[in-house]
Image (cartoon, rainbow, N blue to C red):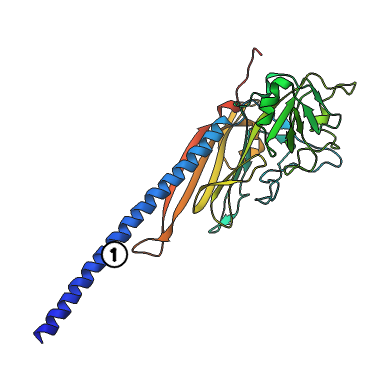
Amino acid sequence: MELLIASALGMVILGGALTLVRQGAQMNSMMSEKLEMQQSARVAVNLLSRDLSWAGTGLQLGGVGLPAGNGAQTARFGCDFTSCYVGNNTFADDRLYGVLPGDGKGPVVNGIATDMVTIAYRDLDSKLDQENLVSISSDGTQIQVTAGSAAEAAKLRAGDVLVVSNLIGYAAAVVTSVSGTTVNLAAGDPLQLNQPTAEVGMVASLVDEDDNYPPSRAFRVELVTYFVDPNTQQLMRQVSAHPPAAVAENVQDLQLTYDVFDETGATASAALPDAGGTPNQIRKANVFLRVSAPNKALFSNDKQEVSLRTSVSTRNLTFRDRYE
């Protein structure tokens, strides 16, 4: 009897010790998960903030015209050469601005419609625009760079976005291939920017009244879209027409609002989900990101969550070179 009692007590003590050890291990795992969540969310928010701080760099304050007119297809974002990754991915109007809000255009996660955002800025590392183009084909589907720019042209990849500019204006196009000093901008690109038959907003429209191209240059633009993947709940970052890459896991919500300033009426508005329909007047972007742990908490059926908020001044959207 004493042996049985001693064995039972020993088993109770051993069971309690094992429970404490297991809970300690789970607690340690939870702390590691929380640190990973915080780090993942912080990296994603920092990356998004960096892109927002660059928004509009090197672009017209009024945006770059996109293909429009009879027979033109609406330009879009969030696509590469194999697939489109988001629904409702067409531009709200016929201009490419530094920031394009996507209020509620992301997937619904736990009953909440997430946001998207597309950010455009000039790639200052590319030196393609240091010399004028040698020529542009009459339909705007091919540009020829100088021999001195061949090394920069070789850095281009199919899916990159270029902006061709001259005295007539600006037009965006997607690189489809590069061969030596020839850069091809063939029709049928993933973003539907290369439309030779559109009325306006394409490279072929940058001609004078004699149908000649004035001296023109081209520079590379980073067209960055952030969205939540509905299947994996990852925050994705896609650049131009290249495949997207994940920057955060287990994303539960992504919300952005915008502070705008109407220079005509000298009035300011804050926290507008769609920037009041005036993306060229955005002065600040407010970001909210919420992520969760992959596993449930130790003492409940809920998952740990981390939320981060930040605000970013879009200084390049208001810059004016008055003495240019």
Left or right: 74 in relation to 239: right
Residue that mark 1 sits on: 22
Q: Quadrant of residue 302?
A: bottom left
Crowdedness of circle 1 by 10 Å Cα count: few (<14), some, many (20+)? few
Amino acid found under the numbered disc labelled 1: Arg
Q: How many marks?
A: 1
Q: Nearer the viewer, residue 94 or 46?
A: 46
Q: Quadrant of residue 164?
A: top right
Q: Look at the picture and state if 154 lies above or below 72.
A: above
Q: Secondary structure at mark 1?
A: helix
Q: Look at the picture and state if 7 lies above or below 290.
A: below
Left or right: 99 in relation to 136: left
Residue lying at 70% horizontally and 39% vertically, measured from the top left: 158
Q: Quadrant of residue 321?
A: top right
* Residue 61 in view here: no
Residue lying at 50% horizontally and 44% vertically, measured from the top left: 288
Q: Position of residue 236 (x, y in %)?
A: 57, 47
Q: Position of residue 168 (x, y in %)?
A: 79, 22
Q: Position of residue 271 (x, y in %)?
A: 54, 39
Residue lying at 74% horizontally and 19% vertically, measured from the top left: 132
Left or right: 22 in relation to 137: left
Q: Nearer the viewer, residue 156 or 73?
A: 156
Q: Residue furthest right?
A: 210
Q: Nearer the viewer, residue 102 or 275?
A: 102
Residue lying at 51% horizontally and 38% vertically, measured from the top left: 47
